[in-house]
Image (cartoon, rainbow, N blue to C red):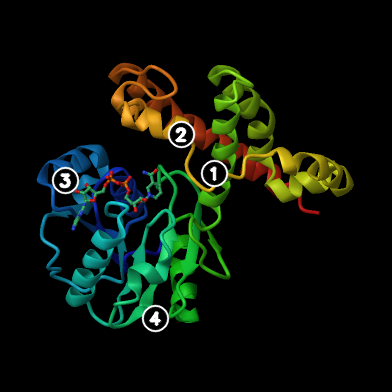
Amino acid sequence: MQNDSLQAVVVGAGTMGTTLAKLMAVHGVRVTVVDTNPQVLGASRLSVEENATAVCFTTDLQLAETPDFVIESVTENVAIKREVVAQIEAGVADTTIIMTNTSGIPIDDIGSAMRLPQRFLGTHFFNPADIVPTVEVVPGSHTEATVVQKACSWLTRLGKRPAVLNTCVPGFVANRIQHAVMRECLSLLEKGVVEVEALDDIVQYSIGVRMALNGPLYQRDLNGLDTHLNIARYLYPDLDARQEPASLLEEYVAQGRLGAKAGRGFYHWNDESRAQHQARERESLQRIIEIATQHASGDEP
Ligand SMILES: NC(=O)c1ccc[n+]([C@@H]2O[C@H](COP(=O)([O-])OP(=O)(O)OC[C@H]3O[C@@H](n4cnc5c(N)ncnc54)[C@H](O)[C@@H]3O)[C@@H](O)[C@H]2O)c1
């Protein structure tokens, strides 16, 4: 991998910052990880494990060298991100490209106060960032085309599949789709149509396994667009179209049912079951990605 000359900084050493650091280290990029919380930095260093020698960890955003790019991956809060981006911009050269790993906050909302917003863009990685191939590349209204090209070329060198959006919309593509699916799932639970386990089973072993091989549009082509239209005509009036989050979700969060990290979400969890699942998931994801890539390479129309 020809990344000897590349130098990067990741700001935020949480779930995503840590797997971003692993990704860089594995590909020979010299990377510095910055977080205001020393405990989080310590945990991140442990998790990066065998690659840790190639990674520098610090609480100080005053950067000693000039990185090629900085990825902001701090808490999903527009005010915090704006402040962090302003700090990054104050400390780097005008040539450094600044990226945000926001899950879907509009790029202009984060970058509009920047001195040079033309070198700022969204690069939305998926968890774990060192394994999942796609990165949504999201230009803001000021981002220069050459900046988008450069970011895509670096992402490709990191083994990623950059997918560039034409226009920035809230939630980008992946989270809009994920939330549309979850809105309907929660609505079905609220109406008592199906239980949690059965819903997961139906989605995972039907459209789930199919989508690992074919994107939704490719899959619909194979199914027939006329059939899709016939179903859409009678189904859409019955689908959930609420403008607010489901009350079931509000209730769970208010009760502290935050998911695996809290011991309870839709299911019951403990530290052991969570750790076991996460360890198996990394390995299984790699196998699924391998199968999907092989399938696609023999399947060009
Ligand atoms: N977790 C996911 O599945 C996922 C997936 C894709 C994108 N993202 C996005 O990635 C970003 C980070 O998410 P995460 O899940 O890693 O969050 P996290 O809460 O695990 O980590 C965020 C880190 O940012 C640090 N931080 C906060 N303010 C800071 C500052 N001023 N300077 C330096 N560090 C600061 C916190 O100490 C924390 O360690 C968010 O924008 C999130 O939406 C998350």
Q: Residue furthest right?
A: 226
* Residue sitting at x 63%, y 33%: 208
* Marked residue nearer the N-terminal end (3 or 1): 3
Tell me the residue that label 4 is attached to: 118
Specify the label residue 247 is tagged with.
2
Q: Is residue 105 placed above or below 248 in the rendered structure?
A: below
* Horizontal and vertical percent position of residue 119: 37, 78
Residue position marked by numbered label 3 in the rendering? 41
Q: In the shown orientation, is residue 61 left or right of residue 284?
A: left
Q: Which dot, 2 or 3, sits closer to the camera? A: 2
Q: What label does residue 31 carry, if any?
A: none
Indicate the amino acid at tag 1.
Gln
Q: Alpha carbon of mark 1 to alpha carbon of mark 4: how far?
A: 29 Å
- Percent position (x, y) of residue 132? 48, 45
Under mark 4, the amino acid is Gln
Of badges 3 and 1, the one in the foreground is: 1
Viewport quadrant of the N terminus: bottom left
Foreground mark, 4 or 3? 4
Residue occupying image coordinates x 54% and y 44%? 178
Image quadrant occupied by the C terminus: bottom right
Residue 53 visible to the viewer? yes
* 10 Å crowding of disc 3: few (<14), some (14-19), many (20+): many
